[in-house]
Structure formats: structure tokens, C-alpha cells
Amino acid sequence: VAHRNPYPADFFDETAWNQMVLKALFVNSEIYLIHDFDKRVNKKLAGMLADFVHERWSAGREISPELWRAVGPYAEGDIIEDLNKELHHPDPVHRSAAILALSFTKSKDAGKVLDKHAHLVKEVNNLNSWDEIGKTVFSPE
């Protein structure tokens, strides 16, 4: 239902949309294939996904770097710290996702984190779109 299908973006209410996105991430499905994803990102979804990140990390599990696509525009406070943590991930795809997410937020704290890690920004700038990150996660070279 979620992939390459305009119906959810056009007709799901916010709660149904958010649950679909959370479920897609839970089953490790591609976010970049969800039609009009960026148009439907919302603050409530960002909060749900930030909670999901903490649950996964507490259980010692990985998260999809695509998750940050929905969180970035609403990143502030603790979420900025979570993204800062991702900047230290051993996988450059995770670092690229954190950089993209930080660049999409209006938080001044995000700019400070990016400035502090300017060397990482240069290192991972080859993955500079969410679609490129998604394709790399699901079709590694």
C-alpha cells in the first residue's frame, strides 16, 4: 500500500499516515518509495519516530537512516542530540542522513552541530539527497 501509491498521501488522515510510516520503518521498508512523503511529514510523526529511535537503540538495534527524513524538519532539543549521535555512526550512510536532517531543520543548535562537524559534512557529501540515501540502504554497492 505504501510504495509508489498516491492513495495514502491523498486520502489517509494524519494518524493513519503516521502509522503507515512507522510500520514501514518497523518492517525495514523503503521510505523513498512512499509517494509524496515529504509533503506529509508532520511534527507528530517526527515525535513518534524520535521515540521509535530510542526504543530501537535501547534494544541494541539499528534504525534505518531514512527515518531522519521525517524527523529533520522538526528537530530540536533532544532530537538534535540524537542526530549528533548519528554523526558518529561507523556507516557513512547514517552520517549522511544525520547531516541532511540537520540541514533541514531551522534550529540554531543544528547549525552549531554542523559547524562543529564540518569535516564530516565534506566526507559524506556524496549522498546529498534522501532518495540517494534510500537507494544506497536498500541497494548497497
Image: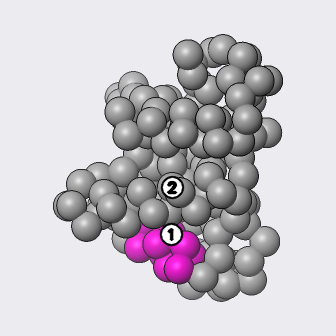
Residue 116, quarter of the rendered image: bottom right
In the rendered image of this protein, does residue 16 appear above or below residue 56? above
Q: Look at the magenta stretch and give its main secondary structure.
A: helix
Give the amino acid at mark 1. Leu
Question: Does residue 92 appear in this view?
Answer: no
Mark 2 or 1, nearer chain start: 2
The residues colored magenta run: 78-87
Image quarter in which the C terminus is found: top left
Which residue position is annotated with label 1? 83
Mark 1 lies on a secondary structure that is: helix
Whether residue 81 appears in magenta in the rendering, the answer is yes
- Where residue 64 sits: x, y (%)? 41, 46
Give the amino acid at mark 2. Leu
Left or right: residue 5 compared with residue 85? right
- Where residue 47 sits: x, y (%)? 58, 62
Whether residue 21 appears in magenta in the rendering, the answer is no
124, 76: nearer the viewer: 76
Which residue extends farthest left? 60
Image quarter in which the N terminus is found: top right
In the rendered image of this protein, does residue 46 appear above or below residue 41? below
- Where residue 108 sits: x, y (%)? 74, 83
Q: Could you tell me how far apart the alpha carbons at marks 2 and 1 are, in whole angstroms?
A: 13 Å
Residue that appears at 51% across and 49% down = 67
Which residue position is annotated with label 2? 49
